[in-house]
Amino acid sequence: MFTIAEIIKATKGQLVQGSLKAKVKAVCIDSRMVKKGELFIAIKGDVFDGHDFLDGVIAKGVHVIVVHKDVDIKNDAVSIIRVEDTVRALGDIARFHRLRFKIPVIALTGSAGKTTTKEMIAAVLARKFKVLKNEGTQNNHIGVPLTLLKLKTLHQIVVLECGTNQPGDIVWLADVARPTVAVYTNIGESHLEKLKTVAGVFKEKWNLTSFMKSKDTVIMNADDHLLFRQTNQKNPFKIISYAKNNKADYKASNIHIHSGRYLDFQISGKSIQLNSCGVNNIYNALAAIACGMFFKVSFKNIAAALKAFEFPQGRGQILRLGKGWLINDSYNANPVSMRSALQTLSAIETTGQRIFVVADMLELGSQSRGLHQVMGISIAAAGVDVLITVGVLAKLTAVKAKQLNKKMQVFTCADVESAQKYLSRAFRNGDAVLIKGSRRMRMEQVAEFLLASPKGSG
């Protein structure tokens, strides 16, 4: 519940019409979903502008709206608050609401593994607490505020994934979320189009700590060289580290992959099992273990939560495919996550071929061509039998991989439909297939095609 006065205070807006006495029970930005008694914030998106739907919103019983341009509303019962930027106003209101609660807020970021790590942390903490988390990948300037606006008195802890693709994103999300714990997965070649260098990625990601206090905690991957360097700097925060190679507070040891299907490892002599053969997921689990231990979840409950954990769709899911396997990692792609996915394909046990279907890695800026060629070197050495690429940039990967591994079958495709055709020819029941790409490259359609194939069901 918000009063008009609270909304004006939070947004520094101006009441241009209506009464200060009005109240709203919730906040909505979708004209299709808004309900009577809610505050509607008119946001201009890439396709639609909320200002164009105000008449329909008011017809649904909305009596308070936030706008960033002049609007002509004849109904005097409607209160109109004018702000400079409605997107920022959404964040301002979310921050105001978040600060009503004296509970821990965990915010996490990194170049790869964010969503899986967020889900693991939430699963571990849910064994003891009522957890609020952002659903899916609602990790941007819209998703994070909308998640925080769902915060209720029943919640005991918040877990937020925070993403970025340009300078300034993370500091804004940190300002809105005001985390008490920051978690870092890794720092690597991601969103270089605007962040320019890996050092630029680190600088942007480290801004997650901008509004944290000296008593707050940072949990980080000590095997990541930039993060490891930060652990040796003078920090105002409590640092908790995790690793499988370097010295750390939580270090994985005795790692074993069983039948190429699942793995286990030990923490201080205690066993953890994951329903994955991807060793990169050990890092995600270690971050969750560190969070669980920090918030005094029993090790027994931590281990149970991780053993039962189901990987999010399109993020390293390992699915049965006839007598073989499908590794569906089609949600996103950058060099960091690509290398991790290759490790999983190499580790999985199969009597058939190892097939890699890969699309362009996006938003890598001036380094894009070189990074795609370097990925070809990694693929050539990873024991891949068949490589199918989609896109102009991924063709560079294919050319380099074929140069270094003459035995590999390589097919280059301009689109998803061509990739499906070549995959249908190359795939045999019993093969292990890794599909790696991003939503913009539509690689999830290749996974759906393969799962529906008669060859994949036998």
Image (cartoon, grey):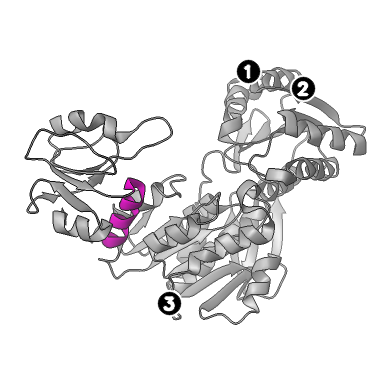
Image check: 31 left or right of 193?
left
For marks 1 and 2, give the CA distance.
Answer: 14 Å
Up/down of 143 relative to 299, above or below? above
Q: Sort mark 1 into few (<14), some (14-19) or many (20+) by Cα contacts within 10 Å.
A: few
Amino acid carrying mark 3 in the image: Lys
Up/down of 455 relative to 167, above or below? above
- In the picture, the disc for residue 213 is 3
For marks 2 and 3, give the CA distance.
Answer: 56 Å
Q: Magenta: predominant secondary structure element?
A: helix
Instruction: Residue 143 in the image: state x and y as whole percent.
Output: 40, 47
Instruction: Residue 76 in the image: state x and y as whole percent.
Output: 7, 39
Residue labelled with disc 2:
426
Q: Toward which corner of the image does residue 338 lie, by quadrant?
A: top right
Name the one closer to the observer, 258 or 113: 113
Quadrant of the drawing holding the C terminus:
top right
**Picture residue at 84% right of the left edge, 44% below the top:** 377
Name the one closer to the observer, 130 or 97: 97
N-terminal of the two: label 1 or label 3?
3
**Picture residue at 55% right of the left edge, 76% below the top:** 239
Amino acid carrying mark 2 in the image: Ala
